[in-house]
Amino acid sequence: MSNHFKIICALTMALMSCGENKEEKKPAAPVVENYKTMQLAHRSISGNVQLPGVMQPFQFVQLFPKINGFVRSVTVDRGSVVRQGQVLITLEAPEIEQQVAAAKLKYTQVQATYITSKDRYRRLLVTSKTPGTVSPYDLEAAASKMQGDSATAQGEYANFRAQESYRSYLTITAPFDGVITERNLHPGALAGPGAQNAKPMLVLQQLSKLRLVVDIPEQYASQVKDGDKVRYKTNALPGQEFTGFVSRSSQSLSNNYRSETIEIDVLNTDNKFKPGMYAEVVLPTSGSANAFIVPKSAVVVTTEKKYVIAVENNTAKWVDVSEGNQTNDSTEIFCNMRNGDEVIVNAGYQVKDGQKVR
C-alpha cells in the first residue's frame, strides 16, 4: 500500500471521528404552563398579633447600706407591707456619732470667734466716727478679721451638716409604698458597702401597680402605638381575659433581638397578679400602606431567601420579598415592584428564573 493511500485513509478516519464526537445540543427548558397570575395592588392586612409578656413591679429597689455599721433593728420581714418614709432598718456606728459631736463642737467654737470679731469691728466702727480715735488700718484689719472668721464659721457649719447627713444614713426608710419581697440580714450583723457578698439588705417592690412588658418584633413595631387597646390573659388565671392600653414604648429597637419594648400599666389593687407572671398579649396591628397582599402560595421560601415569581413578557423573574402581617391564607409582602405587576399565584421551585411561561 502506497504512502499516499495511507494518508488519505488516516484523514478520512479522523474526519469521521470528529463528526461522531460533536456534542449534542441541550434541549431548551420546557415552557411552563397551567399557572395562575394576579396583579399587585397596594393594600394592608389589619388584624392582631399574639405575643408573650411578663409582669414586672412598677417600682423596684434594692436597699444597700451607704456606710458601715452594725444592724440595731429590722422592723420588717419578707411580705411586710410598708409605706413611704417608714423606718425599715436602724444601724449603729459609734464613730459616726463621735464625728458629728466633734464637728458640732468645732462649729460652736469658730462661731463664737466670729461673733467676737464681729462685735469688735462694730465697736471700732462706732468709735472711728470721732476723728483721731481709731486709725484706718486698725478698722480695715478688724473688718478683714471679721470676714475671715465668718468664712471659717460657714465652712465648719457645712462640715457639721455633712456629718449629720452621714448619721442619717444609719436609718433606712422606704422610698415608696410597697411590699418587702426579700430580706438578707438580721440584728447584730455588720452591714456596709460590699458586705455580705453585695446582697441587698432588703428588696422593696410596688405591687399595687405593675408593668406588663412586651417585646414587639421589628416588623410590627411601627404598627403599635401608645394608647392602643390590648387584651391579655395569664396561665395562672385560666378562663379570664383582661384589657389595658399601651402606656409607653422604648421608641427604639434592641440590637440583640431586633424588637421594641412596650409597657401596659396594670392596676393590681386586689393582688390578683404577681411579678414574674407570664401573659399572652393580643396587640392590634394596622398593617403597612406600602405592602402588597398575595396568597401564601405565591411566596416561595428557601433556606436562603423568600421570593415571588413575577411575569414580564412571558418570562419568569424571581423577585426577593420580605413578609409582614399574615392571615390564614394571605400575607403582606414588601418588594421592588409596582401596582399592576403580575406574579404567579401557584408558584413553586419548578419555575426557574428566566424561564418562558405561557
Image (cartoon, rainbow, N blue to C red):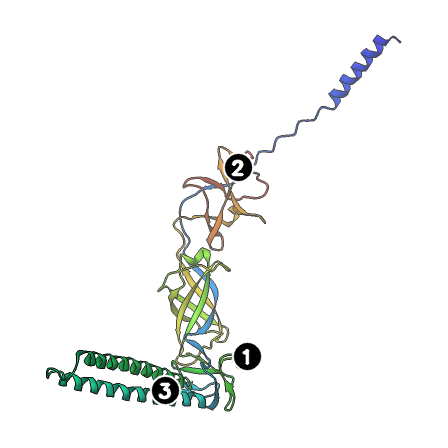
The answer to the question of whether label 2 and label 3 lie on touching residues, with beta carbons closer than 8 A, is: no
Say what secondary structure mark 2 lies in: strand
Residue, disc 2: 316
Kind of residue indicated by mark 1: Asn
Give left or right: position of 344 versus 112: right
Give left or right: position of 136 versus 285: left
Q: Quadrant of residue 231?
A: bottom left
Measure the C-alpha gap from mark 3 to mark 1.
33 Å
Residue at position x 64%, y 30% from top?
27
Measure the C-alpha gap from mark 2 to mark 3.
89 Å
Kind of residue indicated by mark 2: Ala
In front here: 311 or 191? 191
The answer to the question of whether label 2 and label 1 lie on touching residues, with beta carbons closer than 8 A, is: no
Q: Position of residue 330 (x, y in %)?
A: 47, 51
Kind of residue indicated by mark 3: Ala
Residue 103, numbered label: 3
Which sits earlier in the primary sequence, circle 2 or circle 1?
1
Q: Quadrant of residue 104?
A: bottom left
Residue, disc 1: 197
In front here: 142 or 156? 142
Q: Position of residue 312 (x, y in %)?
A: 48, 35
The residue lying furthest to the right in this view is 1
Figure disc tally: 3
Give left or right: position of 158 versus 169: left
Residue at position x 73%, y 20% from top?
19
Residue 74 in view: no
